[in-house]
Amino acid sequence: MAIDNLGKGAAAQAIQNANLMCGLDEAAGLRFDGLGV
């Protein structure tokens, strides 16, 4: 599953890879709902 719209930078990809290696959901820690302004 690609998470293209949640983070396009290398940091987001690193988090996604770490999640996979730890057996977590790929999107864990990547979802951001915005500022709610």
Image (spheres, rainbow, N blue to C red):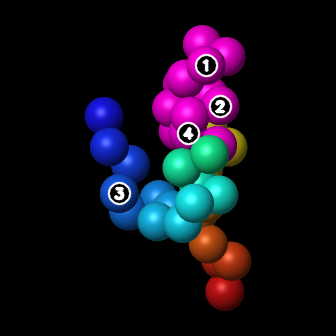
Disc 1 marks which residue? 21
Q: Are marks 2 and 1 in contact (CB under 8 Å)?
A: yes
Is 33 located above or below residue 31 in the figure? below
Magenta stretch bounds: 15-27
Circle 2: is it few (<14), some (14-19), or many (20+) Cα within 10 Å?
some
The amino acid marked with disc number 1 is Met
Lower sequence index among marks 2 and 3: 3
Q: CA distance from mark 3 to mark 4?
A: 11 Å
Q: Nearer the viewer, mark 3 or mark 1?
A: 1
Lower sequence index among marks 3 and 1: 3
| Quarter of image, res 29 | top right
Q: Nearer the viewer, mark 2 or mark 3?
A: 2
Magenta stretch holds residue 26: yes
Disc 2 marks which residue? 18
Across and down, in percent, residue 16 comes to 55, 39
Is 32 located above or below residue 35 in the figure? above
Can the viewer see residue 31? no
Image position of 15 (left or right of 3) = right
Taking depth in this image into account, of 14 and 32 the one nearest to the observer is: 14
Q: Are marks 2 and 3 in contact (CB under 8 Å)?
A: no
The amino acid marked with disc number 3 is Asp
Disc 3 marks which residue? 4
Q: CA distance from mark 4 to mark 1?
A: 9 Å
